[in-house]
Amino acid sequence: MHRAERYELTFPVSGDSIVVTRTDRAGAGGHPVYSDETGIVQAEIDEHGNVRMLASGGHQSHDVPARAVPVD
């Protein structure tokens, strides 16, 4: 099954959109981990576009994206 190399995540609270790129890692659910350029925003995204945000530092809490849209 083809998985997108990049996704645009849109966060409803802030209204921000961030593009994340697939890494060589897998998350706890076995799905690919995607990261922004800084490495601060990290998310596990499954083949249906469901997103689980991952903390990249202590005491970090992310808003849950309203959507993950493939960018290819």
Image (cartoon, rainbow, N blue to C red):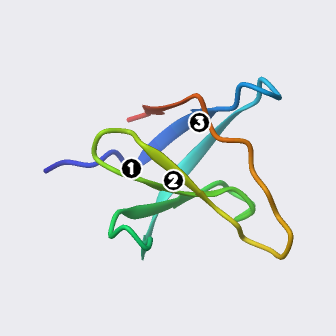
Disc 3 vs disc 1: which is toward the camera? 3
Q: Residue furthest left?
A: 1
Query: Is 51 located above or below residue 33 in the figure?
Result: above
| Cα–Cα span, label 1 and label 2 | 6 Å
Query: Is 66 located above or below residue 24 in the figure?
Result: above
Determine whether label 1 and label 2 are within 8 Å by CB. Answer: yes
Badge 3 density bin: few <14, some 14–19, many ≥20, Cα 10 Å: many
| Cα–Cα span, label 3 and label 1 | 13 Å
Earlier along the polypeptide chain: callout 1 or callout 2?
A: 1
| Cα–Cα span, label 2 and label 3 | 11 Å
- The residue positioned 86% from the left and 70% from the top of the image is 59
Question: What x and y, as percent, mark residue 72?
Answer: 38, 35
Amino acid identity at mark 3: Leu
- The residue positioned 27% from the left and 49% from the top of the image is 3
Label 1 SS: loop
Quadrant of the rendered image containing residue 39 = bottom right
Question: What x and y, as percent, mark residue 70?
Answer: 40, 34
**Residue named by callout 2:** 21
**Residue named by callout 1:** 5
Q: Nearer the viewer, residue 16 or 62?
A: 62
Label 2 SS: strand
Question: What x and y, as percent, mark residue 53?
Answer: 60, 55
Quadrant of the rendered image containing residue 60 = bottom right
Amino acid identity at mark 1: Glu
Q: Nearer the viewer, residue 7 or 57?
A: 57
**Residue named by callout 3:** 9
Amino acid identity at mark 2: Thr
Quadrant of the rendered image containing residue 31 = bottom left
- The residue positioned 48% from the left and 40% from the top of the image is 7
Question: What x and y, as percent, mark residue 20?
Answer: 57, 49
- The residue positioned 76% from the left and 29% from the top of the image is 16
Kindly identify which numbered label has been placed on residue 35. Answer: none
